[in-house]
Image (cartoon, rainbow, N blue to C red):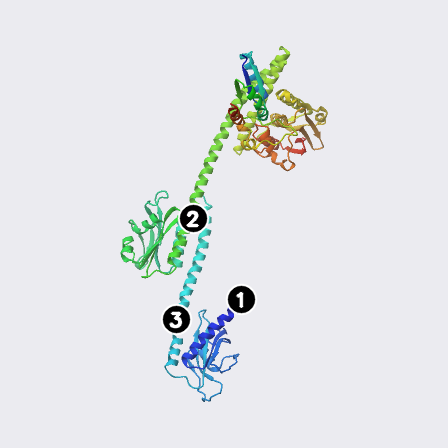
């Protein structure tokens, strides 16, 4: 409905225009045509349609379906065609008296057919003809202006698209080539503003201060500081040094204020650069928010600046600013990442060294205490204290080993298990030792009991598993530590064995703080702790299960967490040899 | 007059050692142990009535021992975490004084 209304308004306007032209020429009616199809050379329309018509009151003329011969000739010759005069007979329908060519803004041909009862003569007709003669030229100028402006925006859009693509490519590199970016920006200016005779890109010399000096980094001549081959007369190539650039007060003022400026004053242009013969100068700051990076300067030939020059200058300046800002930010991020990597590496190395320094004395202490206990020359109370000391030393060794594993993985290095074949008895000894230590170290007031179900372990039979003994001790120790930490009082932590044809699993089952089944896999993530564990139970780094997972993977095994309400079972599964 | 010493420590190994050493140094002292922040808060009224002479306070302390029916910790504990438990207890004691 709206389109029909708009079409009706448009038609009313056209009819009004036709009425004015007809009456001005002394006609009693007029029809405006447009060509709907054209021949190859556009001279003769193969079809024409009526754009609008007007006839004086009392004259009823149906809209013709095709143009009369005079109009067709006007279409073909693009000149005024006077039709043969008819007899002036009152009451008779007006006849075609003249046909004039019309040029539409979109380049299509048209014609205006005038009607009357006799020859059209007089000043008014002559003026109308002259006006219609001028109109095409005016329309052509206007159309060219619009077309030129549209073309420049199309070129700008294409140029910016290519610029952004180039900027993306350069920003992806660790060492972007800024000159290619400047060159692209300068090229866009020349493409979009044909009147431009020179485009300069300046960068602020130090930091991002508005009082920095401006250094010319790119000009229409090429990169500044390099050589440009120039074809001299006779075809030989001569090399020309770029001319030194003096201070640029106009550009400097733009950097200082952060505001775009333009001038057509010869003295300002000469002060800026006495060597350039320009009619106008436009400068725009290259900046992002309030951070200045430089200035873009454009010199043009004509005495007046093209209508879109300032806007184009601003758009390209903004693109340059965005590129430079992103480049700087990316550079900072890369440096920060590099620093973090170095810091992380040095911290990992320090941890490994500490593990080594701790591990040795602890191992010796454990062995010596073990020796004393085995010698059996101490009383019961002393023996139980020595067992506690031995358990503490083993726990300390596990913590030191965890630090070492963490450091190795932080450096991106793989763990290197020392694999050996372990039998059911080896496993049983290891598990019983771990359970004893856990029992000794657990708080007696909480009455948590650690139990190893031997039959399940012996189900391994004569088969063997290939594993690193210290890794297995570490994994089991971490699981028992967790069980001690999170179990409810008066509960049993059960250590069992589960065997099938291809694998053997050691399971640790405890009843305590529940694990959400949705978090079963997250438990194995580095530094993850459940919300209840984080608040209720105090110390814990969230590394125990993650380290166990890494150790098991290095031995081609797996770890799984299976929570069922308050009961949690953790399985360490080893492939059988 | 017997000195009254309260030891606030959740690690039973350290608490045992500390208790032994304190008892050895102050044979006549009365030594009480509190193992969680929740226990400490529960006994605040008691400490108001009978003020300890010395409180040896661990900074990082668990809120409570795992229990099936344990209520959710208060908001200041949930937001501050166990790392600041000792400071929270110290503030509570100063308010009591």
Where is residue A26 drawn, in percent x and y?
A: 41, 81
Marker disc for residue A2: 1
Task: Residue A532 in the image: state x and y as whole percent.
Answer: 60, 32
Residue A42 seen in the figure: no
Given the image, what chain letter belongs to the residue carrying mark 3?
A
Query: At 51% across and 71% down in the image, what residue appears?
Result: A8
Work out whether residue A266 can be spotted: yes
Please tell me whether residue A522 is drawn above or below residue B2 in the rendered image.
Answer: below
A196 or B86: nearer the viewer: B86
A467 sits left or right of A251 in the view: right
Q: Residues within 10 Å of mark 3 (few under 14, many from 20)?
A: some
Give the class, few, some or many, for how many residues have Cα within 10 Å of label 1's Cα (few <14, many ≥20).
few
From the image, tell me which residue sits under label 2: A323
Sooner in the amino-acid sequence: mark 2 or mark 3? 3
Of the residues under marks 1 and 3, which one precedes in the sequence?
Answer: 1
x and y percentages locating residue B97 in the rendered image: 51, 23
Which dot, 1 or 2, sits closer to the camera? 1
Camera-side mark, 1 or 3 = 1
Q: Quadrant of residue A543?
A: top right
Task: Give the structural element (helix, strand or loop) at label 1.
Answer: helix
| Camera-nearest label, 2 or 3 | 3
Residue A548's mark? none
Q: Nearer the viewer, residue B3 or A569?
A: B3
- Determine which quarter of the picture holds residue A150: bottom left
CA gap between label 2 and label 3 equals: 43 Å
> Crowding at label 2, few (<14), some or many (≥20) Cα neighbours within 10 Å?
many
Residue A138 marker: 3
* Place of residue A477 in the rendered image (x, y in percent of width and height, measured from the top left): 62, 25
Q: Nearer the viewer, residue A10 or A265?
A: A10
What is the quadrant of the N terminus of chain A in the image?
bottom right
Discs 1 and 3 carry the same chain letter:
yes
Rendered-image quadrant of the C terminus of chain A: top right
């Amino acid at each position: 409905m709206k389109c029909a209304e708009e079409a009706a308004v448009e038609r009313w306007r056209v009819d009004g225009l036709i009425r004015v032209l007809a009456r001005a020429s002394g006609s009693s009616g007029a029809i405006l045509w447009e060509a709907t199809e054209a021949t190859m050379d556009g001279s003769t329309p193969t079809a024409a349609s009526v754009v609008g018509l007007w006839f004086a009151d009392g004259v009823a003329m149906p809209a013709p379906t095709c143009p009369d011969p005079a109009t067709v000739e006007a279409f073909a010759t693009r000149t005024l065609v006077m039709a043969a005069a008819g007899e002036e007979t009152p009451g008779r329908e007006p006849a075609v008296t003249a046909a004039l060519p019309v040029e539409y803004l979109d380049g299509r041909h048209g014609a205006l057919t005038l009607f009357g009862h006799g020859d059209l003569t007089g000043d008014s007709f002559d003026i109308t003809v002259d006006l219609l003669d001028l109109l095409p030229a005016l329309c052509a100028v206007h159309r060219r202006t619009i077309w030129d402006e549209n073309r420049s925006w199309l070129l700008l859009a294409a140029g910016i698209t290519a610029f952004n693509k180039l900027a993306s490519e350069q920003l992806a590199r660790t060492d972007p080539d800024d000159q290619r970016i400047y060159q692209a920006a300068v090229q866009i200016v020349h493409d979009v503003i044909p009147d431009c005779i020179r485009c300069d890109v300046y960068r602020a010399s130090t930091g991002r201060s508005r009082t920095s000096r401006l250094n010319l980094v790119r000009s229409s001549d090429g990169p500044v500081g390099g050589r440009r081959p120039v074809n001299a007369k006779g075809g030989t190539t001569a090399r020309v040094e770029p001319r030194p650039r003096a201070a640029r007060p106009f550009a400097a003022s733009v950097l200082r204020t952060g505001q775009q400026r333009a001038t057509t004053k010869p003295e300002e242009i000469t002060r800026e650069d006495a060597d350039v013969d320009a009619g106008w100068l436009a400068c725009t700051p290259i900046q992002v928010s309030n951070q200045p990076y430089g200035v873009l300067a454009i010199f043009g030939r004509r005495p007046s600046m093209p209508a879109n020059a300032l806007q184009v200058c601003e758009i390209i300046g903004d693109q340059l600013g965005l590129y430079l800002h992103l480049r700087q930010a990316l550079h900072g991020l890369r440096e920060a990442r590099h620093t973090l990597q170095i810091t992380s590496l040095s911290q990992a190395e320090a941890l490994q060294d500490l593990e080594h320094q701790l591990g040795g004395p602890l191992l010796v202490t454990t062995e010596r205490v073990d020796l004393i206990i085995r010698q059996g020359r101490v009383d019961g109370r002393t023996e139980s204290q020595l067992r506690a000391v031995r358990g503490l030393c083993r726990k300390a060794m596990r913590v030191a080993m965890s630090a070492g594993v963490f450091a190795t993985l932080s450096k991106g290095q793989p763990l290197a298990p020392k694999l050996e074949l372990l039998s059911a008895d080896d496993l049983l000894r290891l598990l019983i030792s771990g359970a004893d230590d856990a029992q000794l170290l657990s708080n007696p007031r909480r009455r948590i009991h650690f139990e190893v179900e031997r039959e399940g372990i012996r189900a391994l039979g004569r088969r063997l598993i290939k594993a690193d003994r210290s890794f297995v001790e570490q994994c089991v120790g971490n699981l028992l530590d967790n069980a001690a930490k999170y179990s409810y009082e008066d509960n049993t932590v059960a250590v069992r064995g589960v065997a099938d044809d291809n694998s053997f699993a050691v399971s640790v089952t405890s009843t305590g703080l529940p694990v959400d089944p949705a978090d079963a896999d997250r438990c194995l993530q580095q530094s993850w702790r459940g919300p209840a564990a984080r608040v209720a139970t105090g110390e814990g780094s969230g590394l125990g299960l993650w380290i166990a997972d890494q150790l098991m993977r290095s031995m081609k095994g797996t770890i799984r967490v299976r929570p069922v309400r308050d009961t949690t079972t953790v399985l360490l599964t080893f492939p059988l040899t | 007059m017997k000195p009254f010493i309260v030891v606030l420590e959740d690690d039973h190994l350290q608490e045992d050692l500390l208790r032994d050493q304190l008892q050895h140094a102050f044979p006549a002292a009365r030594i009480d142990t509190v193992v969680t922040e929740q226990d400490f808060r529960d006994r605040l009224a008691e400490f108001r009535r009978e003020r300890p002479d010395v409180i040896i306070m661990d900074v990082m302390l668990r809120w409570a021992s795992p229990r099936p029916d344990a209520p959710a910790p208060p908001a200041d504990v949930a937001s501050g975490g166990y790392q600041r438990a000792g400071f929270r207890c110290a503030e509570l004691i100063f308010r009591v004084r």
